[in-house]
Amino acid sequence: MDRDAELKRRGQRTSIFIAGVAVFWFLIIKIGEEDEWSQRTRALFDLVVLAGFGVGIWKSIQIWRARQADKE
């Protein structure tokens, strides 16, 4: 049961992380439009956000694999 609680906490942290990346992306888009950032700067932040989503997917797959290992 302790392992299930740990996996649940990891899942919650991962979902908060992904939601945080999405909010960050939204804010960066709005700030970039208002301050008229160059396309290069906006693309840089887009790549940072893309990397953040990649980390979120990677964490999710790790959690899924840990749960699959527990079933066996």
Image: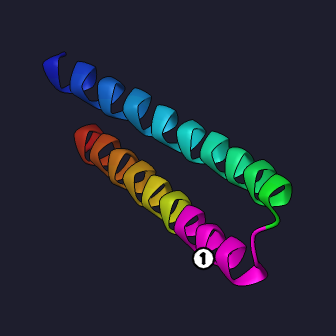
| Image side of residue 52 versus residue 10, left or right | right
Please provide percent x and percent y for residue 71: 29, 39
Q: Report the residue at 32% width, 40% height from top.
A: 67
Q: Report the residue at 55% width, 58% height from top.
A: 53
| Image side of residue 42 versus residue 64, left or right | right
Q: Which residues are magenta?
A: 37-50
Please provide percent x and percent y for residue 32: 76, 59
Of 45 and 66, the residue lying toward us: 45
| Relative to 62, residue 18 above or below | above
Residue at the limit of the structure toward the left, as seen here = 2
Q: Residue 58's quadrant in the figure?
A: bottom left
Of the 4 image quadrants, the one containing the N terminus is: top left
Magenta-span inclusion, residue 65: no
Q: Residue 63's quadrant in the figure?
A: top left
Q: What's under tag 1, amino acid-wise?
A: Leu
Dominant SS type (magenta): helix
**What residue did someone put label 1 on?**
44
| Image side of residue 2 versus residue 19, left or right | left
Please provide percent x and percent y for residue 7: 29, 31
